[in-house]
Amino acid sequence: MIVNRRQFLLLTAGLAAGCQAVKEDVNSGATTGHPVNAGPVSNFAADGVYNNFRDHGFFVICEGGKLSALSAICTHRKCKLVAERDGSFYCKCHGSTFDPAGHVTTGPATRDLPVLPSHTDEQGQLIVTVPVM
Ligand code: FES
């Protein structure tokens, strides 16, 4: 692969920066919650789905230099989801599936997975606000 100067600068800037958390409350629907420290944002530098916090109710997603937290709880009847190798999500309870962005691809779930509010604190830790169930 041959890259020009501009592409090289963009690629190296992206590698140096890694994934960055941005304040996110789009589609969360959460009005109350408790903060969970997911650790240093440097732990999520590579693009992909991190399922270390599935039992806390979320997946950390790094995509294109942006970090986000996607609910790991099925919107049908609240079973924990499984992250698939292709970045999609599967619910073992009744078979719902969600694409990597959290959109429903197979029911019975009808609502997309919410993106949970998250930010990076002063110490560089990723803080995710998990809704109270
Ligand atoms: Fe997930 Fe029913 S709880 S499909």
Image: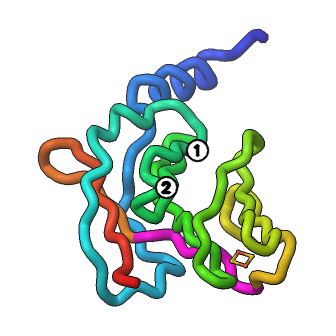
Calculate the distance from the C-alpha at mark 1 to the C-alpha at mark 2: 11 Å
Of residues 83 and 62, the one nearer the viewer is 83
| Secondary structure type for disc 1 | strand
Name above or below for residue 19 compared with residue 22: above
The quadrant of the picture occupied by the N terminus is top right
Q: Position of residue 27 (x, y in %)?
A: 53, 80
Residue identifier under label 1: 49
Residue type of the residue flagged with mark 1: Val
Residue at position x 56%, y 24% from top?
Answer: 11
Mark 1: give few (<14), some (14-19) or many (20+) Cα within 10 Å: many
Residue at position x 33%, y 40% from top?
Answer: 41
Q: Which of marks 1 and 2 is nearer the N terminus?
A: 1
Q: Main secondary structure of the magenta part?
A: loop
Quarter-of-image position of residue 20: top left
| Secondary structure type for disc 2 | helix
Q: Which residue is at the far right? A: 106
Of residues 119 and 3, the one nearer the viewer is 119
Residue identifier under label 2: 54
Residue at position x 40%, y 84% from top?
Answer: 133
Quarter-of-image position of residue 82: bottom right
**Which residues, given as a range, are shown in magenta?**
110-116
Quarter-of-image position of residue 7: top right
Q: Where is residue 36 in the image (x, y as percent from the top left)?
A: 27, 60
